[in-house]
Image: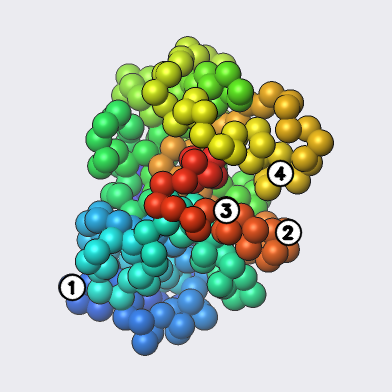
């Protein structure tokens, strides 16, 4: 947990003051532009039916929350979107439609309350690993890096083998680390495992290798080359404006198009 002193340090670093309306976790639509224009950090949440009252805990000077909702009862102030493409569609929508006005630092996350651990079958799992706190994502350029990812899972393609970060699954194995990869190296990961019912081995098209090489790496000549990818479960990460804009807007438009055809496309899993 971030100390009060560290929170004050963030408050001094970020400005101006963000005031959230009483009874709401969000700014109202009429004030959204004002908030985004002055925010140093923008938190983009992909919401469906999650309770977002927890966002009050992170009401911090210079931090603006933007919630996109695909649920049938969007929270007050949320931006409604069609229920397609999972959370990746939401994140890409934000980038495409705000490409030239992105905040200096953007945090992307599913809207479930951040908390330690992942529990299979529990939609309320908060997906924080080891000693990581949600405050850590709100700190721009940690260790002078232009993004912040905490990799908590890895998958090998095309085999479908997977491994999980021990510090997310077992409290006894949590380390004090906040780093992208376990400080213990290979010992910070569990054994490789395989689930024949997992979406990664569903056989749906396009395959991960086809999608990754064509739309992400942009090297279609290598679509059969195996790859191991690490990723943050819960789709939570942060990136600077410069890092995002290192790719042209058209790159994100093309990705968004791949995620816009159904509510649960296989491309949504590949993007996570």
Residue at 59% over, 38% down: 206
Give the mark nearer the N terminus: 3 vs 2: 2
Work out whether mark 1 precedes mark 4 in sequence or the reverse, and give the earlier one. 1
Q: Closer to the camera, 29 or 65?
A: 29
Label located before the other in sequence (4 or 3):
4
| Residue plotted at (67% across, 26% down) | 227
Mark 4 neighbour class, 10 Å CA radius: few under 14, some 14 to 19, many 20 or more: some
Image coordinates for residue 217, horizontal then vertical, percent: 72, 43
Horizontally, residue 155 falls left or right of residue 214, namely left
**Which circle's residue, 2 or 1, is located before the other in the chain?**
1
Foreground: disc 2 or disc 4: 4
Percent x, y for residue 202?
A: 47, 28
Nearer to us of marks 1 and 3 is 3
Residue 226 versus residue 83 in the image, above or below: above
Q: Which mark is residue 232?
A: none
Relative to 126, does residue 252 appear above or below in the rendering? below
Mark 1–mark 4 Cα distance, whole angstroms, equals 45 Å
Number of the label disc, if any, that sits on residue 258: 3
The picture places residue 154, in percent across and down from the top left corner, at 53, 27
Dot 2: element: loop
Q: Residue 214 shows which numbered tag?
A: 4
């Amino acid at each position: 947990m971030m100390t009060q002193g560290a929170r004050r340090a963030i408050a001094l670093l970020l400005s101006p003051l963000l005031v959230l309306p009483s009874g709401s976790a969000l700014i109202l639509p009429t004030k959204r532009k004002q908030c985004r224009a002055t925010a140093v950090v923008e938190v983009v949440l992909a919401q469906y039916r999650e309770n977002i009252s927890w966002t009050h805990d992170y009401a911090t000077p210079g931090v603006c929350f933007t919630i996109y909702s695909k649920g049938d009862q969007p929270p007050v102030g949320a931006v409604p979107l069609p229920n397609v493409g999972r959370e990746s569609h939401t994140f890409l929508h934000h980038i495409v439609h705000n490409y030239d006005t992105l905040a200096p630092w953007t945090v992307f996350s599913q809207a479930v309350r951040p908390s330690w651990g992942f529990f299979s079958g529990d939609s309320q799992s908060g997906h924080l690993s080891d000693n990581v706190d949600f405050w850590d994502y709100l700190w721009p350029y940690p260790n002078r890096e232009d993004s912040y990812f905490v990799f908590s899972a890895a998958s090998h393609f095309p085999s479908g083998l997977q491994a999980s970060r021990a510090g997310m699954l077992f409290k006894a194995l949590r380390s004090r680390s906040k780093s992208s990869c376990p400080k213990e190296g290979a010992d910070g990961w569990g054994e490789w495992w395989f689930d024949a019912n997992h979406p990664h081995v569903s056989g749906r098209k396009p395959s991960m290798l086809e999608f990754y090489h064509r739309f992400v790496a942009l090297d279609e000549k290598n679509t059969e080359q195996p790859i191991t990818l690490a990723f943050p479960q819960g789709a939570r990460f942060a990136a600077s404006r410069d890092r995002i804009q290192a790719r042209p807007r058209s790159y994100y438009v093309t990705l968004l198009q791949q995620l816009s055809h159904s509510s649960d496309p296989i491309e949504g899993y590949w993007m996570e």
